[in-house]
Image (cartoon, coloured by chain):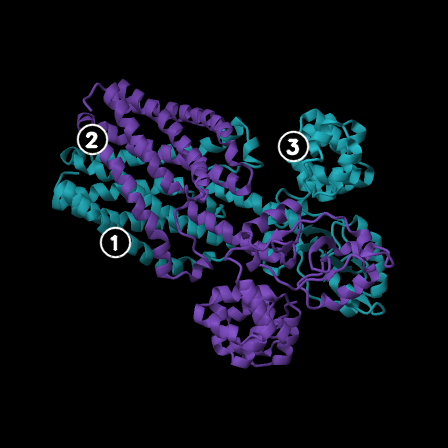
Chain colours: A purple, B cyan
Amino acid sequence: MTNLQTPTLTDLIAARRWPEIREIVAQQPVAETADLLLELEQADRVLLFRALPRSLSSILFAELEAVQQNELLDDLTKEETRHLLAELRPDDRTQLFEEMPGQVTQKLLNLLSGEDLREARQLLGYPEESVGRLMTPDYVAVRPHWTISEALQQIRKMGHDSETVHNIYVVDNTWRLLDALDLRRFILADTSRQVQDIMDDTFVSLPAFADREEAIQAMQRYDLSVLPVVDSDGILVGIVTFDDVLDVIEAETTEDFHKTAAVGPVLGNYRDATFGLLYRKRVPWLVILVVANLASGAVIASYEATLEAAIALVFFLPLLIDSSGNAGSQSATLIVRALAMGDVKLRDWAQLMAKEVSVSAALGLTMALAVWGIGHWRGGYEVGLTVALTMFLVVLIGSIIGHSLPFILSRLNWDPATASAPLITSLADITGVLIYFYIATRLLGLAG
Amino acid sequence: MTNLQTPTLTDLIAARRWPEIREIVAQQPVAETADLLLELEQADRVLLFRALPRSLSSILFAELEAVQQNELLDDLTKEETRHLLAELRPDDRTQLFEEMPGQVTQKLLNLLSGEDLREARQLLGYPEESVGRLMTPDYVAVRPHWTISEALQQIRKMGHDSETVHNIYVVDNTWRLLDALDLRRFILADTSRQVQDIMDDTFVSLPAFADREEAIQAMQRYDLSVLPVVDSDGILVGIVTFDDVLDVIEAETTEDFHKTAAVGPVLGNYRDATFGLLYRKRVPWLVILVVANLASGAVIASYEATLEAAIALVFFLPLLIDSSGNAGSQSATLIVRALAMGDVKLRDWAQLMAKEVSVSAALGLTMALAVWGIGHWRGGYEVGLTVALTMFLVVLIGSIIGHSLPFILSRLNWDPATASAPLITSLADITGVLIYFYIATRLLGLAG
């Protein structure tokens, strides 16, 4: 497609050659145009945006991040904003309202027409992070007694304005969902038959108030790219499509990753995150863990006599407490992820603990053998034995802490991902120094 | 649906009431039946499997995990296995061959018919974790000069055996991909027009040899639930559907999670992971990090005189090295995730480093203030100053290490997720003890 003779899109924009620009843009995926838009100066940005056909500019707008959406809205006239909002898909509109600052959202809501305003209010009425916030009411519904031919007519009529026609919903006269059918069934069926003849009475739906993570699980479990959403009476209120769910997966995964490192979730693009946001998301756990680490220090202080008598013990301190923390982080991460994927349930705790104990005992033994010689070489027979025995126990106990904490948090209805590597490390440290100095005092025949 | 009067599916299976079982199973999602199958005794499992219609049993089989697939294959006759393989979708078949032990795969390949064998060999010929391994050759293709009516006929003809008809592919007479069109366009178009009239010449395709992560990125970026796959000449060789991509997202995310905790990726369900597998995936990093931790010990040993002179310094050792590791883990995780999502590129390194330094300096200052008083109280003016100054520096330097390592690994074409919390912690420890004892020796006026 690229040709050295033809000017690039950026050149064309600089030259304000709008008809050619429109032609090129119409032939490339919207995501590419969105990238181009971001590279332009703010003044050029709004010009390009205005030059696009309205149907395209609304899709393009939905692709941008909140920061850029806000900037662009600043440059548009009230009338342009009104048209843009009217063209946006209801689910993209909900997301925009969610992400804009409160006063901007209020201004935008005022620009909506009566019907759109009612719809927006309804969608924003669902709790944050609920399925209702993701859905769009633009789908195609048919009735069971219609012929396939009538249904296809309805699909043609409603198809333009629907987010997707890949799934068609069968509803009764109270709009209660009776079935969800792949469009394929309609294409393959004899047109003179009735919709009820091709119904299979098997469908999966989500309640609008359900957590959005349930949409991810349902799509994965049932291999569906679109899910119908119903209210508590089974009335069809909207659909959730796979593209929204992909975004949710990304956001939820990021949140879990950040939690494993004791960072509050940093939403949006990391590159755009401000100093203040990053500071606020990182400082709480760092400070909280000071307390835990001081406890480790207090344990050490209580064994000051032991330490003074055998200063060589300090040599192995980082090794022992880090190994315990590392083994604990491994265990915790395995469980946190398995719980998040639904591979492991709370009731599996005891059975998995047996496996964890055997695996970590083997790991502890390996580690003990690895450090025995070094301990012996540096401090003699007793120090070698102390270090090896401690290593075995701290790897075992660190693993058990790491294994149990996500289950305990989950039991208390906390997010198991709160069992972060730093938290596990700090907890493992305290038990690690306790074990180390207890064993050292005994084996080396020192006073505690 | 549940009624206390009617027997449950498990009861029906115990009573071998197959006609009723078949009726219930036909009306519930396959994933539910798969769950039921797993709860049954092995003998009952194969009975239920045999009682199902063949088209259903092949879909059900694809839903099972490798362990259960292998068990089930053991119980089926050669003829049953042959039928099952013939019914499996090509992409599900590739996955089965990938996951079974080598000799089982060979036995299965021998059961395939000529055409299926050729297809399986071709799909297995693509590299592991490539797009080619995910794809299925069952799609609907049409020609540009066909009328919409002819195209719809083709869709009806091929629709039954295609993985999806939601996207229709336009190819020329060499099967080169010309366009990818939503089925909606065909439904909405005037049937007397030609396919080329509804083409938009905008399509996204993936090379068969591309890494499977590219399929994830393309689906997210372009909001597509199906992607066409082409060879190096642009010839259409298959399609990748969103359900396969959802599975890849899950697997890749798990791999990244495990890496952040220095665990080799544990594939499949954690509950089914064997002792040996878990041991092998956990032991390498634990042992490797012993070396790093011994280096920390060696630093401490070289300052033995300082320590003996001021044993109170040991009290703060866990606090200081843990805080450094925690800050470093936070920074590393933020960057690893931002790199994985494509939010941050290698070239952003310098710009982001400036932000990292300012944020971590602020964090270091906060932490220094938090511990100054405690240091002063335990060890007097000099110890307070030493602890505060060290805290500021180790948080800053730990963060810089955590921030830089993922970029460096990425630059070396390693996976940035290798910058695990345990690795960062160990690196931060070495620099932490160096800084601590250097400052202590200077400030306390002790010999090094």
Q: Amino acid at mark 2?
A: Ser
Q: Residue at x 28, y 23 (%)?
A: A439
- Which element is circle 3 on? helix
Residue B180 shows in the view: no
Q: Nearer the viewer, residue B328 or A147?
A: A147
| Residue placed under numbered mark 1 in the picture | B365
CA–CA distance between discs 1 and 2? Answer: 29 Å
Labelled pair 1, 3 in contact (Cβ < 8 Å):
no
- Number of the front mark, 1 or 2: 2
- Number of the front mark, 1 or 3: 3
Q: Which mark is residue B21?
A: none
Q: Within the image, what quadrant is residue A101 found in?
A: bottom left
Does residue B391 sit above or below B25 in this rendering?
Answer: below
Q: x and y percent of residue B142 in the render?
A: 80, 59
Q: x and y percent of residue A394 in the render?
A: 36, 28
Q: Which mark is residue B38?
A: 3
- Number of the front mark, 3 or 2: 3
Does residue B377 sit above or below B276 in this rendering?
Answer: below
Does residue B277 sit above or below B222 in this rendering?
Answer: above
Q: Which mark is residue A302?
A: 2
